Image: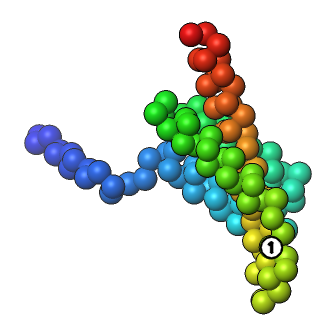
């Protein structure tokens, strides 16, 4: 009996698990910002859990400082009030989106900041 030949998958042909997990996190952010289909008592902990998983598995050591800087910029932008943009309710949506997106970034930021501080103190 002839052995079945496995076709080698080209890179980019399928998503890796962490990419799918990041897309799920972004979908939960959009669901939370746009509708209340999933209650906040479930949505925010799921987003935070995805953030922690991604911080341990998906962010490389070389990317720590850039990620932390981007998180600081996100925190600054989140403090702005976009509700003054009243056209089609865009401002309120942007405020809600940034609030949920912060939950996708903040736990990872905490984990990476502690890891970076541990490295600095250890040296």
Q: Residue 76: name its quadrant.
A: bottom right
43 to the left or right of 62: right
Q: Residue visible at 77% across and 59% down?
A: 78
Q: Residue visible at 16% across and 45% down?
A: 5
66 to the left or right of 43: left
9 relative to 62, above or below: below
**Residue 53 pos. (x, y %):** 63, 37
**Residue 17 pos. (x, y %):** 49, 45
35 relative to 55, above or below: below
Q: Mark 1, residues whose alpha carbon is within 10 Å: few (<14), some, or many (≥20)?
A: some
- Whether residue 109 is visible to the viewer of this picture, yes or no, is yes
**Residue 121 pos. (x, y %):** 65, 13
5 relative to 99, above or below: above
| Residue lying at the far top of the rendered structure | 122
**Residue 104 pos. (x, y %):** 70, 50
Q: Residue 24: name its quadrant.
A: bottom right
Would you name the residue on which mark 1 appears?
82
């Amino acid at each position: 009996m002839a052995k079945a030949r496995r076709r080698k998958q080209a890179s980019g042909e399928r998503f890796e698990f962490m990419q799918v997990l990041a897309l799920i996190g972004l979908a939960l952010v959009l669901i939370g910002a746009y509708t209340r289909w999933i209650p906040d008592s479930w949505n925010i902990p799921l987003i935070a859990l995805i953030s922690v998983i991604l911080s341990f598995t998906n962010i490389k050591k070389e990317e720590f400082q850039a990620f932390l800087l981007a998180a600081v910029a996100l925190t600054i932008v989140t403090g702005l009030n976009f509700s003054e943009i009243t056209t089609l309710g865009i401002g309120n949506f942007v405020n809600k989106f940034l609030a949920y997106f912060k939950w996708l970034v903040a736990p990872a930021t905490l984990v990476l900041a502690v890891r970076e501080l541990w490295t600095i103190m250890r040296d």
